Image: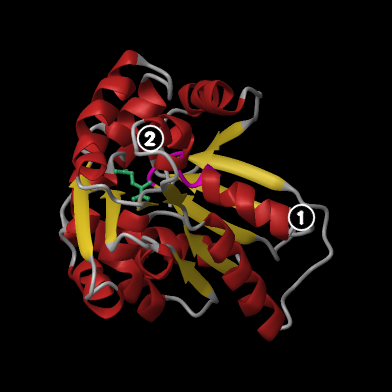
Amino acid sequence: MSNQHIAVFDSGLGGLTVLHALRERLPHEDYFYFADTRFLPYGDRSEHFLRERGVVIAEALARRGAKALVVACNTATAAAAEAIRAAIDLPIVALEPGVKPAALLSRSGVIGVLATTRTLNSERFQRLVGNHANQLRVVTQACPGLAEAIEGEGPGSPLVERLLDEYVAPLANAAADVVVLGCTHYPWVAAAIARRLPEGATLLDTGEAVARQLERLLAAGGLLSGGSGHLRLATSGAPQSVGATIDRLLGRKMHVDHWEP
Ligand code: DGL
């Protein structure tokens, strides 16, 4: 792998939904994807923990030669984006729930947001809603257990179905016409979420917008490369079991290394 790769991290494998959008838009870049599986789920952890962990990871990724960083985790962004920006001197794209595009798209004036408890309780999220969705009704729903269930049991498992029944119902009852997938794990179950919403409801995830933003930043810094599109995957957890989860999610075998920031 060249020293000119893009580093991407998440608490686990949710960020693969973002990585997919990055590789679609920037197929010639090399990528290093880090799943901080040892500490999954981030959604139940304290802001203090996530800020410190986010900085440790970002500094280690910068040291191993990344030319840009994508924080492919709404929860990590909510707690640590500012600290990460202060700690490392790289172009950074940090994902946050697509409240702004949702507000622009909504006709009914009711939008829904599915995210982790930590994201929804953050000051950053409150600011996002205050700045962009002040005139709308914003129905938020925390989804404890969902990211772990998607990884541990699989997107189509009975546990995931049960959690979605519970978490999507308040949004459907409020007749939200746009629903923000405010956690990068949730695109894995987008179809199951859509089935539980009124017909015609739009689901929004931020993968493509993040890819466009990364492309802009790389172009502005003269950092776009015509490389081989190489991908390396690593986890702070057990590589074999993370590999098995990837196989279940993507239907393909991929090599995963152990890496400790
Ligand atoms: N994928 C993460 C996000 O986008 C959160 C999952 C977790 O709780 O670790 O917020």
Q: Position of residue 220 (x, y in %)?
A: 67, 85
State the residue at coordinates (57%, 58%): 7
> Which residue is under mark 1?
27
Q: Toward which corner of the image does residue 168 lie, by quadrant?
A: top left
> Which residue is under mark 2?
193
Badge 2 marks a residue whose secondary structure is helix
Q: Is residue 232 above or below residue 28?
A: above
> Disc 1 to disc 2, how far (Cα)?
29 Å
Q: Is residue 101 above or below residue 223?
A: above
Amino acid at circle 1? Pro
| Residue 4 in view (yes/no) | yes
The kind of secondary structure the magenta stretch mainly shows is loop
Q: Is residue 255 above or below residue 82?
A: above
Q: Residues within 10 Å of mark 1 (few under 14, many from 20)?
A: some
Badge 1 marks a residue whose secondary structure is loop
State the residue at coordinates (49%, 43%): 259
- Magenta residues span 11-16
- Count how many numbered circles sit on residues in the image: 2
